[in-house]
Image: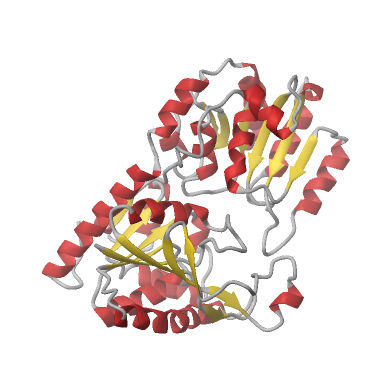
Amino acid sequence: MKVLALSYLFPNHAQLDYGVFVLNRLMAVQKLCEVKVIAPLQSYPFRNFLRPKLAINRAIGSTENMGGLETWYPRFSVIPRYLKFYDAFSYYAAVKPVVSKMMQDGFTFDVIDAHWTYPDILAAYFLSQQYRKPFIVTVRGKEALYIGEHGGRKIILDWCLRRANAIITLSSELANLVAEIGVSRHKIQVVLNGVDDIKFHQIDRFEARLKLGLAQQKKLIISVGRLTEAKGHQHIIRSLSLLTNQTDVELHIIGGLNPETDYSTKLKAQVAALGLGNVFFHNGIQHEHLFYWYNAADLFCLATKGEGCPNVVLESLACGTPVVVTDVGAVSDMLSNGSDGYIINNLDQLPIRIADALEVVWDRERIAFKAQSRNWSVCAEEVIAVYKKVIAVYNQSVGSDIF
C-alpha cells in the first residue's frame, strides 16, 4: 500500500519537535506501507525580519529525510492574520507540482492521508478528485475545527470534512464535534495516539534527577506544553501557591514560545506577584530529553482547555509518573481515575488533587506497563485498517460512503 501524507504540522531539521506526533505515527505506518510526506512551509515577505526568533531556517531544502520518511517541503504563500481562506488555495498550488513529480517517478499512491484539517484538507480533496483516490483527514483537537468562526476558512473546512472518505479523530469528544458539522457517523473512526515505548520508559528517579541536576529531597511537579493561555500553566502556578507545604515542592514548566503571542511574560509576572521562588521555566528541551523529566517528577500536571489525545500524558504514564489532568479529549480513555492519577472536571479541584496526588504512593511500575501497551505500532495498525477499508469501498464504488 502506498500512502501520500500531507501535513502542515511536521518536523524539519530546524524544528525537530514541530508536529512530532505526526512523524511518530507515520514512522510506524511506514513499517507496513510505503509513505511519502509533503509538509509545506509558510512563506511571506519579510518573515525573517518580522519574526526573527520564529523564522524557518532558510537552510531547509526542498526534500529531507525525517525518520526514514522521504519528506518534501514546498513553500506556500500566506498573508499573516488575514484572508485565511487564501491559505488553502496557496497550499494546494504548492503541493500540486510535487505530487505530479512523484507520480512521474512512479509513486502511484493508493490513499491520501491529511494530518491536519486546515489548510491541508482542501489540497487533499482536490488531489482526490484529480487522481481518483480516496482521502482521509485526522482531527487532532478542537482548535482544528475552528469552532465559532464563520468566515471562508470555516466554510471550506466544513465543506471538505463532509466530503472526506473517512475522518480519524483522536477522541470520542472530537468525533461528536465532527458529527455536529454534518459528517456521517459511519465515516468517523476514533484512533488514539500511541507512545514511543522505546524512548519513554521507567528508570530510577534518583538517576533521572542526578542527570538533570535536580534536588533529590523535593517533590517535583512538571507541566509540558507551549506557553499559551489555553495550555493552562497559570492554573498550576496558582494551585502551587495554595499548597500548605509549597516550600517542599518545585514546579518545572517545560514549553516553547507560542508562534502568535509570547504568554511567558504573563506567566512570569504571575509567579513574581505570588512571590513564588520554586517555579522554573525551561525552553528548548528536546523531545527525547523529556524522558528524564518525566522520570524525575513525582507528578505531571496538564490544565489545558482542550486537547485531542495529549501525547505528553501518555509519555508521562509510560515513564510511570502519575498525572493530574483536566477532562479533555481522550483523557478518560487514556487513564483510570484514581489509579493512574486524577482527572478533574473543573479547575477548582486542581490544587486539591495536586495535594492529594503528592501524598499517594503510586504503583509506578504498573502505570508504566499499562501505558506502554498503547505504543505507536498499535496505533499504526488501527490507522492502516482504516486505509484498507476506505480503499476497498472506494474501488468498488468511487466516491461512496464507507464503513
Give the percent coordinates (x, y) of residue 260: 68, 64
Quarter holding the C terminus is: bottom left
- Is 132 left, or right, of 317 in this rendering? left
User: Does the image show residue 227?
Assistant: yes
- Is 128 left, or right, of 37 in this rendering? left
Give the percent coordinates (x, y) of residue 265: 81, 53
Quarter holding the N terminus is: bottom left
Q: Residue 96 falls in which quadrant of the image? A: bottom left
User: Does the image show residue 182?
Assistant: no
> What residue sits 70% from the left and 56% below the top?
257
> What residue sits 61% from the left and 41% below the top?
290
Please tell me whether residue 185 is drawn above or below residue 90 in the rendered image.
above
Please tell me whether residue 313 is drawn above or below residue 10 in the rendered image.
above
> 323 or 239: which is nearer to us?
323
Give the percent coordinates (x, y) of residue 299: 62, 28
Spot the residue most to the left.
396
Give the percent coordinates (x, y) of residue 233: 69, 43
> What residue sits 37% from the left and 79% below the top?
99
Number of numbered discs on residues: 0
> 351 or 382: which is nearer to us?
382
- Is 86 left, or right, of 111 in this rendering? right
Q: How is the image coloured?
A: secondary structure
Q: Residue 366 falls in which quadrant of the image? A: top left
